[in-house]
Amino acid sequence: MKKFFTIIGGMGTMATESYIHQLNLRTPAHKDQDYLNYILVNHATVPDRSDYILDNSKPNPLPELLEDLTQQNTLKPDFYTLPCNTAHYFYEDLQAAANVPILHMPREAVKEIKTKYPKAKRVGIVATKGTIADHIYDDEIMAAGYEFVRPTQEIQDQTNELIFDDIKDQNIVDRALFHGFVQKMFEEQNCDVVILGCTELSLAQEREPIEKLDIIDAQSVLVDRTLELALKDQK
């Protein structure tokens, strides 16, 4: 296969499925041959990223992700995507091991703010406790000139509940819970824009969409950037 990209996924599997579903839906296809060429590495057994970031004595996901890249490098994809926000904690090490670019989901999500919400000043995020702790979004948001807004402990606890107890454990989305803590980021934390910085939250947005708030869905942005790059490479 020529002119293809590789998805390093499975973190988690249902969220990766949501990414691929949206990618296929948005591809301008009218026959089988119009769809994109890609390889999915659904590495479901990669250790939990948040657990390791919060406690380095826990199993480290990096060696297994590096092994994925080593295997895929031999196949010579045009680029990689990594549909897991928390895994971008390891981005520099992963990019150093890859022989082609890895799309940086948090960076692309922050870039989207200027295009979609040009008047925004205060940018918040809801994400895993690992993503909050690793400061990837903090750095990207502040480097772009915005004021970074961190979730309160109550909002974080509710976010953890939706991600880990509901979606990862039971594959369900509690609409009231999801809409509630995102609304609090606007009403209590005075955000102008809120980034959904976890692919499980992107899955929640796909199933139970929030339509009247100024949201950046990081995985949705990654879908668009993947599509743009893949279609460009196919020419």
Image (spheres, grey):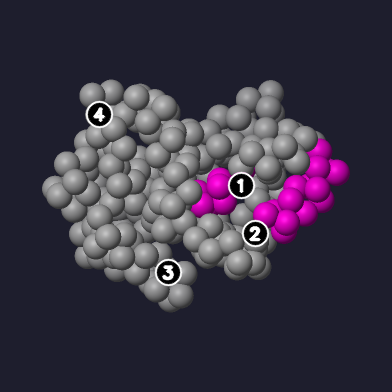
* Nearer-N-terminus badge (2/3): 2
Residue 173 visible: no
Query: Mark 1 or 3 closer to N-term?
Result: 1
Q: Quadrant of residue 104?
A: top right
The kind of residue tagged 2 is Pro
Which residue is labeled 2 in the image? 61
Q: Which mark is residue 164?
A: 3
**Label 1: which residue?**
90
Q: CA distance from mark 4 to mark 2?
A: 35 Å
Q: Residue at x 15, y 49 (%)?
A: 188
- Counting residues from the start of the chain, the first of labels 1 and 4 encountered is 1
Where disc 1 sits, the SS reads helix
Q: Label 4: which residue?
A: 120
Write the residue at 72% across / 37% down.
96
Extreme residue toward the left, this view: 187
Mark 1–mark 4 contact, CB under 8 Å?
Answer: no
Q: Nearer the viewer, mark 2 or mark 3?
A: 2
Mark 1: give few (<14), some (14-19) or many (20+) Cα within 10 Å: some
Q: CA distance from mark 2 to mark 3?
A: 18 Å
Mark 2–mark 3 CB contact (< 8 Å): no
Q: Amino acid at mark 1?
A: Phe
Q: Which structural element holds mark 3?
A: helix
The residues colored magenta run 62-90
Towards the viewer: 32 or 52: 52
Assess disc 3: are there few (<14), some (14-19) or many (≥20) residues with their C-alpha within 10 Å of its C-alpha: some
Q: Relative to residue 152, is residue 206 drawn left or right?
A: right
Quarter of the figure with residue 180: bottom left
- Dot 4 alpha-carbon crowd within 10 angstroms: few under 14, some 14 to 19, many 20 or more: some
Residue 165 at least partly seen: yes
How far apart marks 1 and 4 lie (CA) works out to: 29 Å
